[in-house]
Image (tube, helix red, strand yellow):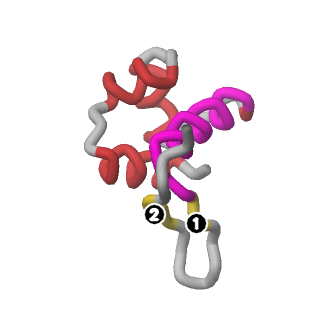
Amino acid sequence: MLPVQCRMARAALGLKIAELAKLAKMSTNTIVRFETGKELKQSTIDDLRLVLENAGIIFIPENGGGVGVRFSKPRD
């Protein structure tokens, strides 16, 4: 997951930074740092990605048209 995909996913879900931080059990500073391109541990990024995937986001890799996100059915 790239920082821009995190911002896209959060916007698609209608989540504020504080709301995502609460769901991910991370500080708001961690979310802000990631979304602004600062380096985080890969395990932190993986945890954040999992929270967004569980909320119904699919991450689309670079495929010639750029990275992106889309909705899926939320996982139970």
Query: Which residue type does callout 1 highlight?
Result: Ile
Q: Tell whether 62 sits left or right of 25.
A: right
Residue 36 x, y percent position in the rendering: 44, 40
Circles 2 and 1 in contact, beta carbons < 8 Å: yes
* SS under mark 2: strand
Query: Which residue type does callout 2 highlight?
Result: Arg
**Residue highlighted by disc 2:** 70
Q: Is residue 72 above or below residue 44?
A: below
Residue 2 lies in the magenta-colored region: no
Q: Residue at x 46, y 41 (%)?
A: 55
Circle 2 residues within 10 Å: few <14, some 14–19, many ≥20: few
Query: Overall secondary structure of the magenta stretch?
Result: helix
Magenta-highlighted residues: 43-58
Q: Earlier in the sequence, mark 2 or mark 1?
A: 1
- Tell which tag, 2 or 1, sits nearer the viewer: 2
Q: Tell whether 12 sits left or right of 37.
A: left
Q: Residue at x 55, y 38 (%)?
A: 76
* SS under mark 1: strand
Instruction: Give me the C-alpha separation between circle 2 and circle 1.
Output: 7 Å
Q: Which residue occupies the foreground of this view, 49 or 53?
A: 53
**Residue highlighted by disc 1:** 60
Q: Residue at x 54, y 34 (%)?
A: 51
Q: Residue furthest front?
A: 76
Q: Which residue occupies the foreground of this view, 30 or 60?
A: 60
Residue 28 - label: none
Q: Is residue 69 above or below residue 51?
A: below
Residue 39 x, y percent position in the rendering: 63, 34
Residue 59 x, y percent position in the rendering: 57, 58
Circle 1 residues within 10 Å: few <14, some 14–19, many ≥20: few
Residue 68 x, y percent position in the rendering: 49, 65
